[in-house]
Image (cartoon, rainbow, N blue to C red):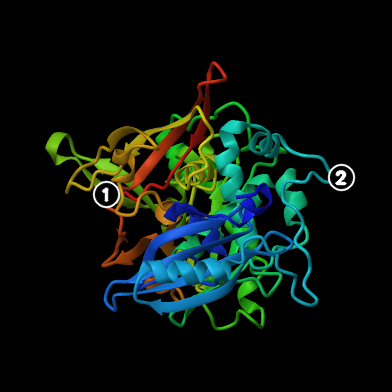
Amino acid sequence: MAPADEPRLITPISQRQFELYALSLERGPDFDPAHIFSAYQAGRGSASGCILLDSEQRTFTSIALRRRVDHCWIKVDEGGPYSTPEAALDGLSIAMRAGDPPEPLPPGARRRPLLVKPGASGTSPEFDLLTTTISHLPALMAIGECYLALPNPDANFVPDFQTSNFASRLFELYLIACFREQGLSVRQDHVSPDFFIEKNGDTCWIEAVTANSETPRAGGIGDWVHAPEDRNERLTGGPAERFAKTLRGKLQRNYHAMDHVKGQSFALALADFHQSGSMVWSREALPTYLYGLRADIEGVGKERRAVATPITNLTGKHGIPAGLFRDPDFAHLSAVIFSNAATLAKFNRMGFLAGWRPPGLTMIRSGILFDRTPGALEPIDFKLSVASDEYQALWPWGEAWCQELEVFHNPLATHPIPFDLIPGATHWFERDGEIVCSTIWANSVLSSVTRLHMTGEGQATGDAHAESDPS
């Protein structure tokens, strides 16, 4: 075949790579009751598509995606049903129109700015690490696709991402991946709140917020900050107070009173970036503040057990009242959605698993897993290569975006969030006076570090990363 015809070639790609592209679909890569049978890409990536198999109907269908001039994916065709995968591939190959120019923008649409083209405000060390190192190429590819999946990013998104608000914008990209992965419709029709999610008639407005330090760029690249040695300080002191001030500051904006939000579920999505490494250990302060209960251990030996100790105030210097969810004045807050996985390490692993694997790059993830054995109070250590079958076998479908997502439900909520709206999250709620959780994941990571190694660079590089604690 002549070189000029090479861009027309249709080549297979992994299911995970197509699922990353499919985050741009209205409900992401959720094709239930069908599932992906095979996936393809045209030439240098101007078109992509998949063949779906409905096992009950025993029929095949196809979905074709093409890039617009601003690189966003749009769905251009749904074909089928077909009786064989070969027939579906023939139809898909035609629909992908390999070699054709990119799709035009809709009339009146604003061209999306390039995420990685530096602007006049300069760049942050985090952005430079992402865009200039081979070891973070998988993260760059995953982040790029999540950015293209945003329905309507605001005008400040790109300059924020490139500079001092890198972490906050990365959190928004993480959330869009979590929501679309679970089959949610995500809209950004209003300036605020940030997201409107819907599934099967259930809805919720979500405003994203990050707990940041007053020090510029805290939580970015820098010396690792360890948890306070004093357990009470860790649970009810500075970390809890920081969460309290962050949440109360957002609640003062009265999102629930906006005309388009009134009478509906409303949640704040929270991540912690106040210090380098703080996301590893600060999470347990959040439920302590929200429910006004401190998790303590009593007894010795086999008699050890976890108990919840009520507290009225945090022990930080401001003495903030504990128990946001005990205050009826905040009944309009349906829940607080939390994750400490909106990090470069998470995006790097997800891009790596999708197939972007620079030669010589290995990833080793080590940490602790929650032990679900009744009465167990100690976690389980693990250390696995991200590329290994053993690592993927930890979860039924391999590592997913939403495994680190937690929803803390307000027991006084005027408009509660149905569990089925965000099914892949770990849900915390009050039952018979106790705070309990529900999750679909047998293996939940409490904390972890992802180590990178490039054989061509002569030394290992570390990329620290913390996950949720569903204990």
Which residue is the site of mark 2?
120
Residue 251 in the image: state x and y as whole percent.
61, 65
Q: Secondary structure at mark 1?
A: strand
Of residues 332 and 378, the one drawn nearer to the viewer in this rendering: 378
At 64% from the left and 59% from the top, the residue drawn is 148
Give the residue drawn at x 58%, y 52%. 171
Which badge, 1 or 2, comes first in the chain's sequence? 2
Residue 301: percent from the left, percent from the top?
Answer: 15, 34
Q: Secondary structure at mark 2?
A: loop
Disc 1 residue type (three-letter): Val
419 vs 99, left or right, is: left
Which residue is at 49% across, 58% downward?
40
Mark 2: give few (<14), some (14-19) or many (20+) Cα within 10 Å.
few
Q: Residue tagged by mark 1?
A: 307
Q: Residue furthest top?
A: 458
Q: At x 67% / y 46%, what residue is drawn?
A: 166
Q: Is residue 310 above or below residue 190?
A: above
Q: Are marks 1 and 2 in contact (CB under 8 Å)?
A: no
